[in-house]
Amino acid sequence: MLTLASKLKRDDGVKGPRTSNPASDSTRRVSIRDKLLVKEVAELEVNLPCTCKVNFPDPNKLHYFQLTVTPDARCFRGMNRKGQFLSDPSHLLVPASDEGYYQGGKFQFEIEVPDAYNMVPPKVKCLTRIWHPNITETGEICLSLLREHSIDGTGWAPTRTLKDVVWGLNSLFTDLLNFDDPLNIEAAEHHLRDKEDFRNKVEDYIKRYAR
């Protein structure tokens, strides 16, 4: 990560006045994206939920990384990995998993930040097969802040950051677990029909795919 940050700083230092042959729009957008990511990744790493870990396979490519979410009722909403509360201390008494369906699992997400960031949201896919009302078995995700166009104002906006994305994905296992507006309709109907059998299937998937 420092490598990319240093490169961007060096590039800024040697950049002279604009010539009559400027870089393409695509190149300029990538440069804007990468400068944003240096700052946002640094912010993200000190504000990770205690249930999350991030991995950058290539530290020079901050636009691609993997997120692991490990739901754990011993963690609390608003707590980072150092055990520090990041917001209202009233979170102290609110467990991080209301139902506890996904405790014991490790769920991998792939996050790719497009060239046009931050005008468009990151592309996110769940790599772990899961039985979840808001995530399909093939990895598509229903999370409002990842919607590029949203009439209710909850979708993506340039003011959002990677921290918002990670906290949003983490919340799919807690307060954003939504059975009323599902993407995986079959999973939501299963929960409505038989909560105990739903829990059993979730646990079976965890044992088979999320260890």
Image (spheres, rainbow, N blue to C red):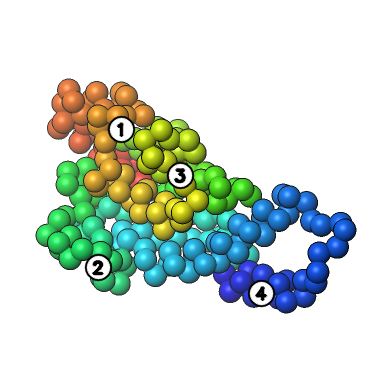
Q: How many marks?
A: 4
In x, y percent, where is residue 203? Answer: 25, 40
Q: Which mark is residue 133?
A: 1
Calculate the distance from the C-alpha at mark 4 to the C-alpha at mark 3: 28 Å
- Above or below, 110 against 39 in this view is above
Visible in this render: residue 135? no
Q: Amino acid at mark 3?
A: Trp
Q: Residues within 10 Å of mark 3 (few under 14, many from 20)?
A: many
Q: Which residue is mark 3?
A: 156
Q: Amino acid at mark 1?
A: Pro
Secondary element under disc 2, as helix, strand or loop, is loop
Q: Residues within 10 Å of mark 1 (few under 14, many from 20)?
A: many
* Spot occupied by residue 10 in the image (x, y as percentages of width and height): 71, 75
Determine the CA span between mark 1 and mark 2. Answer: 29 Å
Looking at the image, residue 11 sits to the left or right of residue 133; the answer is right
* Residue wearing tag 4: 9
Crowd rating for badge 2 (residues with CA inside 10 Å; few <14, some 14–19, many 20+): some
Q: Nearer the viewer, residue 51 or 18?
A: 18
Residue 189, located in which quarter of the rendered image? top left
Q: Secondary structure at mark 3?
A: loop
Q: Residue at x 37, y 48 (%)?
A: 169
Going from the N terminus, do you reach mark 3 or mark 1 first?
1
User: Which one is earlier in the sequence, the residue at label 4 or at label 3?
Assistant: 4
How far apart are the two marked residues, 4 and 1, measured between alpha carbons?
A: 44 Å
103 versus 132 height, above or below: below
> Which of the marked residues, 3 or 2, is nearer the chain's N terminus?
2
Q: Report the disc number at residue 85.
A: 2
Name the N-terminal-most of marks 4 and 1. Answer: 4
